């Protein structure tokens, strides 16, 4: 069993390190210092952690103002509240105004498990990627989280970073270089492609291992940037492997699967299976239990890929590249 | 000296009103009533209070003016044009295809606009952010936000009001354009705002009430900011929707009614008489 990491730790330590050398960095929280792991940063720079209280609309507006005043705000709050409660402010004050604000949605997806659907953030990718000028990044492990924070700082413009609290193994080696808008090919394969991001990347890799045991070679892409999406990687997957399974800790409507399907259907039609939360509010259960419940496991992904391959759909397209 | 300033403000405000009505008539769209209630406040700010430079509109040391009542873009654009942020001729393009002058202001395109407003209750939170940024840098530049009165029904304003007092933002001033009317009816018949001054005081602000069309009173109030050290300042400016044109004044129907050619002519005639 490989070691597991909470990506919030990499997020917090990277931000604190960057704040030491870049005085423009400020952190804005909605009474979420603890859940965003900003205690260390607040201790080091008490004036630069601005707690607006439990007021997300105000949190986003204030961040736009701070950016107007020359600061680079990293706004940290539970993704469910940050994105939903502040959505109009995100659209008008941040994205449309091109405010240089980094929105950091913490504990995204089903991470809050038993707390229920009010606290699940399974629509945030869809909402945020629908907004112009917005860059949407969903890191998969600590190394990618660290690099995504650095890239978000260097990038001028609005960024949404979706950070889970669910423990994940490392999926990238030390040589990995995250780049906004570029998918990472973590495993080569010719029979089918698994496209995942965030907490689902390690599960997709495990699924690929299971598929290999069954004689199916699955390519695995980490699509950590959902907007702008890596159209070329998706086009290649569709043309070279003929079928795609997407996996996200998010509703199947409008998220990663939707983004991939938009590219596939308009460039190289190929069958796509979208795995995620199937348009329901989740029942009561822990986060790991819910992932099992929705089939967001290595075996669930493996079965979906297998069904695609066995139906001949993936191969059919692959064998008729002229279609 | 003050007499000269007031005369200058009156002259500019009159030109701004004439251009605004002409522009709305040409575009066939606009928020006539609320533009006219805000013009004297905007004129006083831009020509006697704000430290802004049309030649360097992004100077980091500028005062920030945030127009929360973004639907009154007409009043803002005509004021910015009068101040030299862009040529007055461009006002002819108001809301025309591909014009920079959208129905609600776009800070990416229009020099002098600080943030994109239109949805109500957005300006004050942004103003709190700029005021905190200035404090963090121990800078001297100040922030002013203009809100409508009906817009104070949006809860986000009160989140911002609470935070501004908590952070002791005495470099922040909100001016409420208290024209008593919102789109459909009087504010007090829609959802009551009064006692409005008490509300702001209870949220920790220093409040002054002023006639929002009296330049001397506005100047005197702006000169004494912050009204109290350590607190944000609220100026409730009592105004009239449609101020300057008799048949528009205090008429809820002129919220976004567009003057016909005849109405424009008689409005300009009235404004011409005021100017003399």
Image: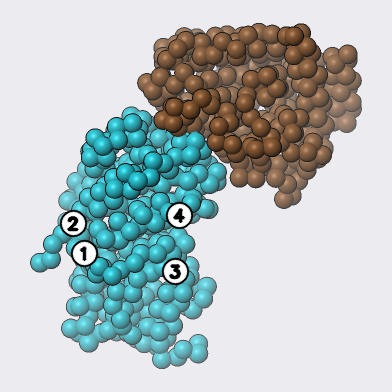
Chain colours: A cyan, B brown
Residue placed most toward the observer, A310 or A12: A12
Tell me the residue at 35%/53% (across/down): A149
Local secondary structure at mark 3: loop
Chain containing mark 2? A
Residue A250, position as x, y percentages in the image: 33, 57
* N-term mark: 4 or 1: 4
Return the disc, 3 or 1, that comes first in the chain's sequence.
1
Q: Please determine if labels 3 and 1 lie on a single subunit.
A: yes
**Where is residue A108 drawn, in percent x and y?**
30, 50
Q: Which residue is mark 1?
A: A170
Give the numbered dot on residue A230: 3
The numbered mark, 2 or 4, whose residue comes first in the sequence reads 2
**Disc on res. A155:** 4
| B127 or B262: nearer the viewer | B127
Which numbered disc, 3 or 1, marks the residue closer to the eye? Answer: 1
| Secondary structure at numbered mark 4 | loop
Q: Residue at x 33, y 74 (%)?
A: A185
């Amino acid at each position: 069993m490989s070691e597991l990491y909470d990506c919030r730790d990499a997020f917090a330590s990277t931000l604190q390190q960057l704040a030491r050398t870049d005085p423009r960095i400020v952190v804005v929280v909605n009474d979420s210092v603890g859940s965003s792991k900003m205690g260390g940063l607040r201790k080091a720079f008490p004036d630069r952690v601005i707690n607006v209280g439990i007021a997300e609309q105000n949190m986003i507006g204030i961040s736009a103002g701070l950016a107007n005043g020359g600061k680079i705000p990293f706004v940290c709050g539970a993704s469910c509240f940050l994105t939903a409660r502040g959505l109009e402010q995100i659209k008008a004050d941040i994205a449309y105004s091109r405010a240089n604000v980094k929105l950091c949605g913490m504990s995204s997806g089903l991470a809050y498990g038993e707390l229920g659907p009010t606290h699940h953030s399974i629509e945030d990718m869809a909402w945020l990627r629908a907004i112009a000028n917005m860059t949407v990044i969903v890191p998969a492990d600590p190394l990618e989280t660290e690099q995504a924070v650095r890239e978000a700082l260097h990038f001028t413009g609005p960024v949404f970073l979706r950070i889970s609290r669910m423990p994940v193994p490392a999926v990238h080696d030390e040589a990995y270089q995250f780049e906004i808008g570029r998918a990472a090919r973590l495993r080569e394969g010719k029979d089918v492609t698994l496209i995942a991001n965030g907490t689902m990347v390690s599960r997709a890799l495990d699924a690929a291992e299971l598929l290999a045991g069954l004689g199916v070679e699955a390519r695995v892409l980490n699509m950590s940037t959902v907007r702008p999406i890596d159209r070329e990687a998706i086009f290649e997957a569709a043309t070279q492997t003929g079928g795609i399974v997407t996996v996200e800790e998010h509703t199947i409507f409008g998220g990663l699967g939707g983004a991939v399907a938009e590219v596939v259907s308009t460039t190289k039609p190929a069958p796509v299976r979208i795995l995620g939360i199937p348009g329901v509010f989740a029942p009561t259960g822990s986060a790991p239990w819910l992932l099992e419940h929705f089939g967001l496991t290595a075996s669930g992904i493996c079965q979906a890929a297998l069904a695609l391959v066995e139906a001949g759909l993936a191969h059919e397209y692959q064998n008729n590249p002229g279609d | 000296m003050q007499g000269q300033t007031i005369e200058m403000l009156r002259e500019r405000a009159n030109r701004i009103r004439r251009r605004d009505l002409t522009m709305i008539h040409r575009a066939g769209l606009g928020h006539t009533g609320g533009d006219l209630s805000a013009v004297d406040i905007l004129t006083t700010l831009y020509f006697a209070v704000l430290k802004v430079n049309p030649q360097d509109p992004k100077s980091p040391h500028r005062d920030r003016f945030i127009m929360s009542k973004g639907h009154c873009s007409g009043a803002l654009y005509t004021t910015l044009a009068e101040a030299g942020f862009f040529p007055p001729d461009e006002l002819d393009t108001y809301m025309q295809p591909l014009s920079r002058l959208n129905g609600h202001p776009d800070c990416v395109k229009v020099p002098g606009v600080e943030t994109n407003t239109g949805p109500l209750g957005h300006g004050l939170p942004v103003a709190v952010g700029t005021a905190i940024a200035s404090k963090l840098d121990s800078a001297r530049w100040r922030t002013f936000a203009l809100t409508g009165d009906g817009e104070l029904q949006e809860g986000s304003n009160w989140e911002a009001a609470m935070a501004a007092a908590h952070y002791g933002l005495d470099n922040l001033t909100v001016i409420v354009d208290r024209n008593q009317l919102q789109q459909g009816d009087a504010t007090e018949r829609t959802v009551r705002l009064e006692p409005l001054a008490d509300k702001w005081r209870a949220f920790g602000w220093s409040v002054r009430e002023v006639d929002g069309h009296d330049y001397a009173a506005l100047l005197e109030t702006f000169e004494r900011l912050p009204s109290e050290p350590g607190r944000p300042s609220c100026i409730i400016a009592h105004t009239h929707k449609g101020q300057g044109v008799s048949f528009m004044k205090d008429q809820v129907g002129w919220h976004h009614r567009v003057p016909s050619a005849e109405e424009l002519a008689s409005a300009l005639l009235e404004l011409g008489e005021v100017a003399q």
